[in-house]
Amino acid sequence: MRPFEYIRADDVASAVGLVSSDPKAHYLAGGTTQIDLMLKDGVLEPERLVDITRLPLRGIRRHGDVLHVGALVTMEELAADVTVTEQLPLVREALLGGASTQLRNMATIGGNLLQRTRCRYFRDPTVLSCNKRSPGSGCAAISGAARMHAILGASMHCIAVHASDLCVPLVALDAVAHIQGVGAQRRIPLADLYVLPGDRPDVENVLQHGELLTTIEIPLLPAGTRSGYLKIRDRSSYEFALTSAAVALAIDDGVITHPRVAFGGVGTIPWRSPEAEAVLRGASVNTQTFRAAADAAIHDTFTVTGTAFKVELAKRTLVRILQTLTEAG
Amino acid sequence: MTMAEAVPAALGPGVDRVDGRPKVLGAAHYPSDVTLPGMAHAALVRSTIAAGSIVRLDTARAADMLGVLTVITHENAGRLQKGKRNLFFPPPAAPLQDARISYHGQYVAVIVAETRQQAAAAARLIEVTYDRDEPVLTLDDAAASSQSNPYFIDMKRGDAKAAMATAEVTVEGTFTTSPETHNPLGPFTTVAQWHGDTLTVYDSTQNPFHVRAVLAASFGLAEDDVRVLSPYVGGGFGAGLRSWPHTILAALAARVVARPVQLSLTRPEMFTGVGHRPSTMQRLTIAATRDGKLVAIDHEGTSTASMGHEAPTRKPPTRKAPLQSLLKAPDEQPYPITAGTAAAYACPNVAARDKRVRLNIAPIAHMRAPGEAEGNFAIESLLDELSYELGMDPIDLRLRNYAEVQPQTGLPWSSKALRECYTVGAERFGWAQRDPTVGAMRDGRWLVGYGMAGVTFNHYQAKCHARATVHRDGTAHVCSGATDIGTGTYTVMTQLAAEVLGLPVDRVEFELGDTRLPQAPQAGGSGLTTALGSAVHNTCVALVQRVLTLVSDDADSPLRGCTIEDVVAHQGRLQHADDESRGETYSEILGRHGLSELTVDGDSAPSRAEAGVIVGSLVVSRLGRFGRKLVGASHATVPAGGFGARFVEVRVDPELGVLRIARIVSVNDAGRVVNEKLARSQIIGGTVGGIGMAIFEETVRDPDSGRVANATLSDYLIPVNADVPDIDVVFVGGPDPANPIGVKGVGEIGLVGVAAAIANGVYHATGRRIRSLPITIDKLL
Ligand SMILES: Cc1cc2nc3c(=O)[nH]c(=O)nc-3n(C[C@H](O)[C@H](O)[C@H](O)COP(=O)(O)OP(=O)(O)OC[C@H]3O[C@@H](n4cnc5c(N)ncnc54)[C@H](O)[C@@H]3O)c2cc1C
Ligand code: SF4
């Protein structure tokens, strides 16, 4: 750990100013990613840490059919919210399937969306080859222990997974992020926030340095929609996903309508699948349909020794959640 | 007086831990809680290559950092001697003595600073340039040197090969297990302080006297000039049985800065600095008659070990005779996998062989049931295969081949209740409800599998000393330099002393964890309760004897002339066994004799049969039937370790490959159970460790660099609560006459058999025989 300056920001404008003006400044929310990477792993070495936890970004408010969630709402708070519980089971299940209660009480929604990859090669500075950490240095994970890595959006440059569970239902729901820059605000669909690694895995999203995520808008699902999140992992709890899928759909006269599908644990970014949705839309409810959707979704994969099994597992994960949602009621 | 046969099978369902209260209140000081005036902090730099040498070390930037007191590397460390040869617990290579690197994670520098954070920050600034050699990292690397019969205990009886050739049924398989890391919760910590030429060390260890010996040798001191304190240790699982280089480095750092120094390992350092369970590969063949009588077992087990510092990189296989290499390169712990094979079943022809492959990996360490857990996994899995081959119930198959006597020597066991383990376990589990057809049992989408395994565990006991004092106020103090790694040693020893002295437990204080106390063996091999408990018992008996001697011709004493057989101790009083009114308290006796206290030293020792069994087994190995006659003539009894049976219900989601453990019944013959609550906790902990071994735990090494790629508790998976079902723990059997307190160890046995029972359950559910641990989702897809 290098000595750094710690500042607790009092209002949004000064927080944004403090970070934007200093290329070596970082935000600190719940700290469950940030502090690990600084103090335990020695990967991040900011010279200034701007604590945003006192900013007024905490409420969960409903505006018509949209839920506005402040960036500093914790994972536990959002999971316990009445609207989320009643109308967004896929969000609640993704939240409660993540981390542990202790972590969820600390971790914020903003931090969850902007969490860094769990790749153990990225997280160990003694590993020299990591394009995400040192652009152009190579990727040690490709030939290494890569069980937890991505098969979609991956390449020789980087196979790091975007590990957030929450992001998976949020991209499926067309959530929108509110971003505050110096003197300017913008709204970015969450799906457009993340960028594929390509040959620049160090660039993870479209945010400018210092831009602050203030609110996330989550459109609610129409009445009658079924939704859920299925997370597959070896341990029953407290483990990131090997594969996961978030699905929402309605059934009208035996036919699927308004399908929404996204995958976790397999993509370098939260992975929405318009291909699977296209197969499901208007199709009848049966396992062949589900399998066809899964085959359409998981294509052009990039696998290494440790991740090859995820191709089939991801497909079966989608099939299973579709079966579960369509069997019930 | 009390002897094993005379005492109840249990001393009651469970005295609460005597160390529970201080632990909960934070008053129990673990090494990492020790703060000394003027204490500085050390941090380590580890090598980032697995083989080769250091070309250049640039320490200037680190040395200039705020708060840094010194940077120690092989260039300025000075000479340290290697610890004395020790077959069970080989001392580490003296650290920082030269530029050679033999594993990823080997220490290359120590930084001492005012604070822990400063030391850690400076450690990151040290730049090391290496000359890298190609490391040897896997068991099947052709460049790896492999030793046969490395521990000199390969065993055989009969002629397994010939019996195989004509056998009616043969099953065979290759089994592999993954490296595991102990991961006790408490990071291993050393606090070292010098007073002139004497050294005091607080250390996370299971083996303080060994640490003392290694430190004394390292710094050229007399053992009496080194004091090791370890009253509380935050878990061990075997990681604390050996001495480790960081302990030596903490002492070195303290000497260099002439201040006390604390060195606490980080979690990633715990993956390379305090040993690991090595990976293993086993080839096993079992032959039987059609009606289930075993005719031959051929078992070959290979385990991995570190290269050792003397020969750090790849080289042609050594052709040295095994004994010679064992004695000459005593830098790794013996890790036999097949050592228990010859003792498990009544099978006339057995061949059990071990091999060791040396790699550029960190040193290994015994981890809960070392070798036994792995060997059992292979044998009990393959017996399950055989049961399907024969169409026979797996329990019947095991009973059919029940070893009524120790099968290698033909000598009787001191006690054995394995049969009860099977029958009681089957009953409680509901084994009779099992439909043996593969895949026949379902619960919705889940396939249900029932699996079981049997366990025969090794016996171990070492020499142990203790001291007991009774005070005039009627309290007692009993002590020995052992450790309590969380298992309950404090409590059980307090109980055993209270029992003999006839005092309530709250009048007895038991002290441990200090090499100034009488010498005790390591907390390991499931042998500490037997050794220390017997020593405490014997010493307390001797103390009562001393008290009786005091009054032997004391005209004022109602106990005058009594021998120990004539009295019982009760409520702080010694009284006539047949007339309790005739007696007096310790206080009265000491008071009348003008004594403030009375102290005796005592000990316990393993019976001669302890070593005799190994020798006898080897004699049979070499001399066959003649050897058996010879051994039989000794009329010895084989001191038995624990026995057990595991019954597991698993659920497998066949489409997703998800495996969950639904329930476990663990039945154990643990001799006399001194404290059922603590013994149960040990079995539960062992069972959880077994679940970890079976389905989660694997220390993953990078194939290129040898770096541990999952060295955190979020990446290295151990079972969480949600993975652990109800565990029904049952004890059967009774006091074992092999030791005065009737006990058998329970520290490790709970783990053994769990992996096989789970794998057997998986087969029953799915028809898939998984011979490689851990059984993860990808293997079941
Ligand atoms: C052991 C462990 C297990 C976990 N398991 C899971 C899991 O199973 N599923 C899962 O989804 N997650 C899991 N996580 C990740 C966890 O959810 C994230 O660490 C957490 O959500 C991050 O939130 P935080 O408030 O602590 O963020 P911080 O650590 O404070 O910040 C994270 C990053 O986001 C930036 N940041 C934070 N807030 C903002 C903002 N408002 N605007 C701009 N930048 C911001 C910070 O600068 C930092 O770079 C796990 C974490 C741990 C340590
Ligand atoms: S996968 Fe990405 S983050 Fe991991 S080592 Fe490769 S480049 Fe770095």
Image: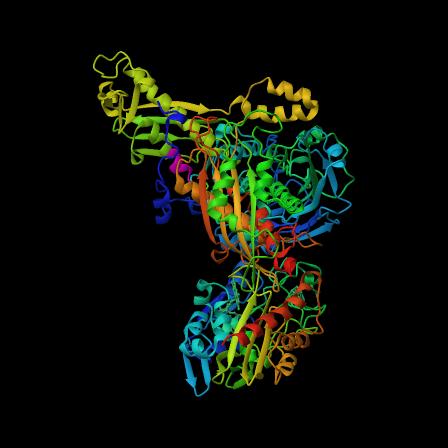
Residue B234: image x %, image y %?
Answer: 46, 45
Measuring from the top left, give residue B737's x and y in whole percent: 46, 26
Residue B409 screen position, x and y as percent? 61, 25
Question: Which is the main secondary structure of the residues drawn in magenta?
Answer: helix
- Which segment did they paint magenta? B488-494
- The image shows residue B24 at horizontal and vertical percentages of 36, 49
From the viewer's side, name the closer residue of A291 and B576: A291
**In this rendering, is residue A317 above or below B641?**
below
Is residue B628 visible to us here?
Answer: yes
Left or right: B482 as drawn, with respect to B178? left
Corner quadrant of residue B541: top left
Which corner quadrant holds the N terminus of chain B?
Answer: top left
Q: Any magenta on residue A257?
A: no
In the image, ligand 2 is in what quadrant? bottom right
- Count of marks, rendered view: 0
In the depicted view, which residue is nearer to us: B78 or B457?
B457
In the visual, does B781 lie left or right of A56? right
* Relative vertical location of residue B752 with respect to residue A289 in this rendering, above or below: above
User: What color scheme is it?
Assistant: rainbow
Q: B192 and A131: which one is in front?
A: A131
Which of the 4 image quarters holds residue B597? Answer: top left
Q: Taking the image as drawn, is residue A159 in sight?
A: no
Q: Quadrant of the C terminus of chain B?
A: bottom right
Left or right of B627 on screen, residue A24: left
**Residue that extends furthest to the bottom in the rendered view of this protein:** A64
